[in-house]
Image (tube, helix red, strand yellow):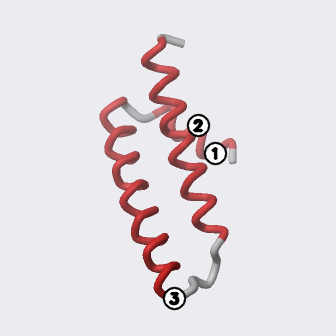
Amino acid sequence: MPKAILDLKSLTEQDLKDKLSEEKLRLKKVTFSHAVTPIENPMSIRFIRRDIARIQTELRRRALGF
């Protein structure tokens, strides 16, 4: 888990925004796929949501200047 945090801090703001949009799209696809037929690992939805939250937190931290 700390590895993901370090990766986010090294990315630029534009890279974070791009990654955020990619993760949101991935979440939609996985959620839809799970609704149609159960996916092998439903915990992956939780992991994707947490990654999205981490990215949003990093963007917010930068916006506030911390």
Check disc 2 and give the amino acid type. Leu
Check disc 1 and give the amino acid type. Lys
In percent of width and height, residue 12 lies at: 37, 31
The answer to the question of whether label 2 and label 1 lie on touching residues, with beta carbons closer than 8 A, is yes
Q: Residue at x 43, y 74 (%)?
A: 32
Q: Quick one: quadrant of the C terminus?
A: top right
Q: Residues within 10 Å of mark 3 (few under 14, many from 20)?
A: few
Name the residue beneath numbered marker 2.
Answer: 6
Closer to us: mark 2 or mark 3? Answer: 3
Numbered-mark total: 3
Marks 2 and 1 sit apart, C-alpha to C-alpha, by: 5 Å
Q: Secondary structure at mark 1?
A: helix
Check disc 3 and give the amino acid type. Thr
Q: Is residue 66 above or below residue 14?
A: above
Q: Residues within 10 Å of mark 2 (few under 14, many from 20)?
A: few
Name the residue beneath numbered marker 3.
Answer: 37
Q: Which mark is residue 3?
A: 1
Marks 3 and 1 sit apart, C-alpha to C-alpha, by: 32 Å
24 and 37: which one is in front?
A: 37
The outermost residue toward the top is 65
57 and 33: which one is in front?
A: 33
Q: Residue at x 69, y 48 (%)?
A: 1
Q: Secondary structure at mark 3?
A: loop
